[in-house]
Amino acid sequence: MKSRQFVDTAEALVRGGHGGAGSASMIHEKFVPRGGPDGGDGGRGGDVVLVGDEDVDSLVSIFFDSNLFAQNGGAGGARRMHGRNGESLLVPVPLGTAVSDAETGIELGDIRAHGQTLVVARGGKGGFGNLHFASSTHRAPREFGPGEPGQEFRLRLDLKMMADAALVGFPSAGKSSLLRGISRAKPKVAAYPFTTLTPHIGTVIYPEKSASLRVADIPGIIEDAHLGVGLGDRFLRHIERARVMVFVLDMAGADARKPWDDFRILQDELSHRDPALLERPRLVVANKMDLPEAEALLAEFRERTHVAPIPISATAGTGLDALKQALYDLIRPETHRRRAADIAEAGTVVARTGGRTKIASAKKTLREKAKHGIVTPRRGYSPPKPLPSPGISVDGDVEQTPEISAEKIAGATFLKR
């Protein structure tokens, strides 16, 4: 029985709608003595389209409902009536979702911006009516096109959270408390190891600079995590896109651990995952400085590692402003400007009301825009550049999947979860 709340990998069977069959109709009217064929064409099947949504943080909906089928096209009718085109199925996915073919492993795209769309299964074309088969020697054709089937295959989706900075540390090092202190995120905090079982993302806001950045907190890493010890290292995938590594160390030495040994082990585990992670800008944070034994261990840590960490206390709230400023100096976030540019580039297909995304209500908004020709997604899709290594993200413009016409978006069906 499926009973998960956070899912970062899912597979789905996607299928575009089948094209409708053409009509083999003949005219039978009083003032049309010679009659003739008048069968209409079948409608085109709908597409399956993935839509980036910043209010979705997991693939759990696709995990529970893995059959994503678009609507079939309608059959043609008499009097040259064209069959109804099938409605596209728009599936909201979290930002940072990499999409690939489950059987071949070929990468199909990467959803990185709010409102970005990616057509993963195209609908089939409608069949011709018998009107198209008429000629000077074939006056009464009975042939008609059956309509093409839609694309169908298994899709694999892998979520790699998009964050500017990533918190890495041992269990009970205070990562969740730190995230609570610098953002409005509310991860679980308790006095036992492995409190955090799933990744969390918080937004650090700089009101005076009109900027913000995203910080990811992943479950604790212990020695030999790359061999499956503890929770393993599979959650390190969520820091592969981060621009800054933040090592959170328990400077009070809980459970007789030494901060310098923890620092060495964390670097070893990152190197086993991807050596490129250690080449990124980093901050070392000495947490729990409110405890009496922390000062002596901090001095010994500096002497052994020649690293000057930022002393803080996540529970007491001391040193957090200095940490936030250090993050800003390293990242120089331009979140607001980037978000506006990404939405304009990708062609937003989700409506926002009251600060939250409303997938279901976007259908009406898109139809109104389509009537006035406002929805004009960019043509000429090309897949995103491959990552030089699993730990290096590629900067660049968000590409847009082509041929999503205004009529197609206007008649789309938004997946309701």
Image: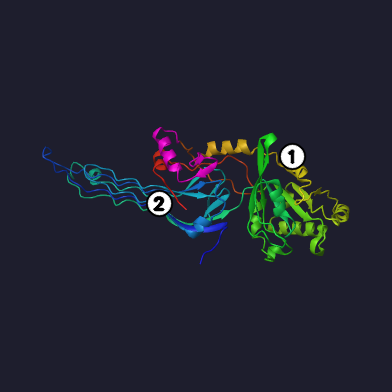
Q: Is residue 294 above or below residue 349?
A: below
Describe the element under mark 2 as helix, strand or loop: loop
Q: Which residue is mark 1?
A: 329
Going by the numbered disc 2, the residue's amino acid type is Ala
Taking 191 as reference, is 5 left or right?
Answer: left
Q: Which residue is mark 2?
A: 70
Describe the element under mark 1 as helix, strand or loop: helix
Residue lying at the far front in this picture: please name it: 316
Q: Is residue 255 above or below residue 242?
A: below
Going by the numbered disc 1, the residue's amino acid type is Asp
Identify which residue is drawn at 61% across, 35% down. 337
- Across and down, in percent, residue 413 comes to 41, 47
Nearest to N terminus: mark 2 or mark 1: 2
Q: Nearer the viewer, residue 368 or 229?
A: 368
Q: Is 360 included in the stretch rendered in magenta? A: yes
Q: Which residues are magenta?
A: 347-375
Distance from Cα at disc 2 to Cα at disc 1: 47 Å
Q: Can residue 168 be seen here? A: yes
Identify which residue is drawn at 41% across, 45% down. 412
- Across and down, in percent, residue 129 comes to 25, 46
Taking 54 as reference, is 298 left or right?
Answer: right
Identify which residue is drawn at 45% across, 51% down. 416
Estimate how packed mark 1 is, as few (under 14), some (14 to 19) or many (20 or more) residues with alpha carbons within 10 Å.
Answer: few
- Across and down, in percent, residue 397 comes to 58, 39
Taking 134 as reference, is 205 left or right?
Answer: right
